[in-house]
Image: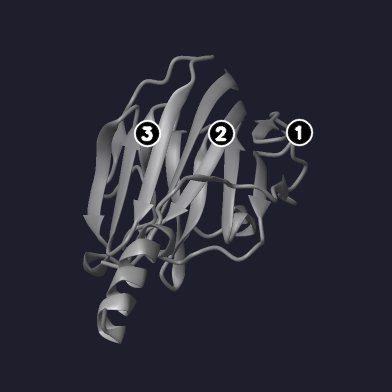
């Protein structure tokens, strides 16, 4: 067997390891220093965000995280309140964005912001009625597109190059680089996982 053949066999054998796309728990969460937040409880892979005297309660992490070619999935429920309960702020290449779930009175889903337009005003805006106390499955993928699913239904699919992507100005900046936030709601989040994708 030639050296080239041996090398090819070795690469083939290692390929599943080198290019694995396994889901891994996403840990390292801490309370986000919003103004007068509610109590944040982090137990294992579960996060409880209680409504506080201020508007936002959240948990974020500052550990290094990919800027592209990744997926995040989690489950979340609005336990009380009437607005967004599982807003995920996440990296998008050299900027950040927030996936709002249940905003603007409880039912608006979308990305904030695209071309300086909030989730209620841009192409990703969609109305979904969330039942209080019910667990929903969420999944987000960032490549050269931003894609998102709720309970296995794709609700967002946009090419990044077509928009100026950024965060809404204000306290949500504190969620960077990766964080959850609830607005005038009590929320529970669990089973937060991620995986790195092969470059496309």
Determine the secondary structure under disc 3. strand
Query: Disc 1 to disc 3, how far (Cα)?
Result: 26 Å
**Which residue occupies 43% across, 59% down?**
17
In the rendered image, the vertical position of residue 15 relative to residue 54, given as above or below:
below
Label 1 vs label 2: CA separation?
14 Å
> Whole-percent x and y of residue 174?
64, 57
Q: Quadrant of the C terminus?
A: bottom left
Q: On the image, numbered disc 3 is attached to which residue?
A: 108
Name the residue at the bottom extreme.
3
Relative placement, left or right, of 186 versus 108 is right
150 over 30 or under it: above or below: above
Position in image of residue 97 (x %, y %): 44, 57
Which residue is rendered at x = 44% and y = 24% of the image? 136
User: Residue 67, located in which quarter of the rendered image?
Assistant: bottom left
In the image, what residue occupies the spot 26% across and 38% down?
155
Seen from this angle, which residue lies furthest front?
1
Q: Specify which label sits upstream in the sequence, 1 or 3.
A: 1
Q: Secondary structure at mark 1?
A: strand
Q: Dot 1 corresponds to which residue?
A: 41
Nearer to us of marks 1 and 2 is: 2
Residue 128: x %, y % from top left: 33, 26
Q: Is residue 189 left or right of residue 7?
A: right
Quick one: label 2 or label 3, which is nearer the N terminus?
3
Which residue sits at x=50%, y=41%?
87
191 vs 168, left or right, is right
Q: Quadrant of residue 94?
A: bottom left
The residue carrying mark 2 is 191
Contact? badges 2 and 3 (CB < 8 Å): no
- Give the camera-side residue of 96 and 18: 18
How crowded pointer 2 is (Cα within 10 Å; few <14, some 14-19, many 20+) is rated as some
**Image coords of residue 124 (percent x, y):** 27, 46
């Amino acid at each position: 067997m030639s050296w080239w053949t041996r090398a090819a066999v070795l690469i083939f054998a290692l390929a599943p390891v080198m290019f694995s796309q396994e889901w891994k728990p996403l840990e390292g969460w801490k309370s986000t220093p919003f103004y007068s937040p509610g109590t944040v409880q982090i137990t294992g892979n579960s996060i409880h965000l209680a409504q506080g005297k201020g508007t936002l309660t959240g948990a974020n992490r500052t550990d290094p995280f990919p800027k592209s070619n990744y997926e995040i999935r989690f489950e979340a429920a609005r336990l009380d309140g009437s607005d967004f309960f599982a807003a995920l702020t996440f990296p998008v290449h050299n900027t950040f964005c927030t996936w709002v779930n249940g905003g603007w009175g409880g039912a608006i889903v979308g990305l904030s912001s695209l071309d300086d337009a909030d989730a209620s005003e841009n192409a990703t805006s969609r109305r979904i009625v969330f039942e209080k106390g019910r667990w929903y499955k969420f999944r987000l993928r960032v490549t050269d597109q931003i894609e998102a699913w709720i309970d296995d239904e794709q609700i967002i699919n946009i090419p990044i190059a077509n928009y100026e992507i950024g965060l809404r100005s204000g306290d949500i900046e504190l969620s960077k680089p990766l964080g959850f936030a609830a607005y005038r709601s009590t929320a529970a989040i669990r089973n937060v996982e991620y995986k790195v994708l092969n470059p496309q």
